[in-house]
Structures are given as structure tokens and as C-alpha cells.
Image: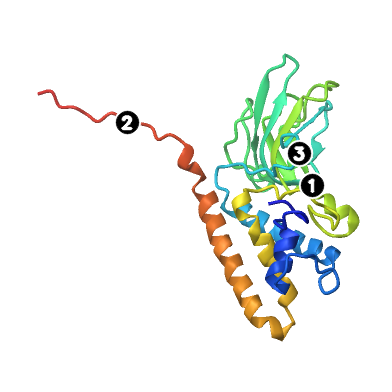
Amino acid sequence: MIYSDTTNKLGIVEKIDFLLFGSSTANTTEYPLADKAREVNEWYRKVMAWIFEYAGNWSFDDINYTDLPIARGNCTSGQRDYTFPSDYVEIEQIHYKDANGIWHKVVPLDRAEISGVGTSESGVIGGVVNQASEEFLKTNGTPKYYDKFANSYWLYPAPNRTSTDGDSLRVYYTRDASLTGTTSGQGGPFVSGDTTKAPGFNRLWHPVLAYGAVYNYCLGRPSLASIKQDAFLETERFRILISEHYARRKKDERSRLVPTRQDNR
């Protein structure tokens, strides 16, 4: 479902006008296009929040992106802290490439654990000590752990080399929606002039954005109480469908067959 389809009247904007005013012809007087875009974007963010909440082991990504949610960068010898991608929602994995081109998975570690545990010479955590994070694995080497701190992550130990290939650190992450509308002050993926752009999640759930925008319009308008109630019930129905859909994403994983014991006596 595209954002606006003035020819076939099948877009999100046209559905909003039909539900509110009984016609798919754009009503820009009572519900200006910029207001529609802002309310649709608000509900887009709600839907994304539902998806992230119920996503489980399936890494969702907005299909409007043309790249993968992998941030690549260089490492600097002796530097612990590196900045997260600006659009990240959740970090999934961090990988480090050493001087021999071998990739290593960096394990997450909380700062509270650093101050309460010690490490062996190999960097394996164990044994309770009172250790400052600055002293934790302070000799440069191959990073084994990372700690999230504000909008950055800290590597322990810091790398023992400086790379220039632009691909020695990889951050695999979940990111926010493709937010082109933020530059126009309309707060999300859509701007009022969009036509063929479509939401970046499954098209089965696209109508929820129209019902959500209708619900928002009805707030504070007592004469539209019936339409508001219908719109609310539809958004709730879609929320349940979305949660059930994304909660079942592990269904495509093949179950392992375990042979039963046979008694040949």
C-alpha cells in the first residue's frame, strides 16, 4: 500500500479521507496533507515499536533501506571507545578483524561486571576483585569484550593495531525506520508530497497507519466519537495480528530430529 495514490484511490492518504469524509478525494482543508503525514509517521513509529517488541530472534529491517544494517569502520591502536551508528536501536553483534584477516566475535560485557571480576592472563573472566574499568585488560591486543556506554562502545582490550581498510570493525544492529520525513519537520518516513513510497514493513499491516491517523484526527472532536471508536478497534486488531505474526517468526526454523533409543534385546 503506497502512501498516496490519487489515480486508483488506494493509498494510505486516500483511505484516511474515505474513512473520515466518505470520499477518497483528498480533503486538504479539514485535514491538510502535512498533518496527515505527521500523524501517519507517529503511527509508523508505534508499529515499529510493536515489531521490535515482538521480533524475537528475527532481525527486522525496514525494506526501504538499500543496504544492510552493518556498520563498518577502522580501528585505532590503543583506542577503546567507538561510536555506534546514529540510527541504531539495538546492537546484535560486534566483530573485529585482526592483522591476519581473521574475524573475532566480541562478547558483550556490562561495566558493573568489570568492576566486580578479575581475568586470567588469557582474558577469561573469573574471580571477584575490585578493579577499575580503566585497568581491565589494559594491554592492547585482540578485543574480547565490549561494553555499551552512552552512544558508544568500549573494547577490552583496545586494539593493538590501526587499520585503514574501513572494514576492521563491524557492528551488526537493528535500526530505526527510514526517516526521510524528519528533514521536513513531519517526523518520520513520509512527507506530504510522497506518492509511491510504501511503509517498510509487511504490506498486510499497512492499513493500520490510516486507521491510526483517523483515530488521532478524531481526538477532541466529540461528533466523531463513533469513527474514533471504530478506528481504535481496528488499530488494536492490527496490533494483535502484528504481535502474533512477529512472535511466530521462529516457525521457519527446522526442528531437529532426535533419534529415539531402541531396545534390541
Q: SS class of the residue under badge 3? A: strand
The residue most toward the left is: 265
CA distance separating discs 2 and 3: 42 Å
Q: Which mark is residue 258?
A: 2
> Number of callouts in the render?
3
Find disc 3 in the rendering and name its residue: 154
Q: Is residue 237 left or right of residue 223?
A: left
Assess disc 3: are there few (<14), some (14-19) or many (≥20) residues with their C-alpha within 10 Å of its C-alpha.
many
Camera-near label (1 vs 2) is 2
Q: Is residue 187 left or right of residue 128?
A: right
Q: Nearer the viewer, residue 123 or 72?
A: 72
Find disc 1 in the rendering and name its residue: 151
Q: Are the two marked residues, 1 and 2, in contact with CB atoms closer than 8 angstroms? A: no
Give the mark nearest the N terminus, 2 or 3. Answer: 3
Q: At 60% from the left edge and 35% from the top edge, which residue is drawn? A: 125
* Amino acid bearing label 1: Asn
Q: Nearer the viewer, residue 63 or 210?
A: 210
Which x, y percent locates residue 20?
A: 71, 73
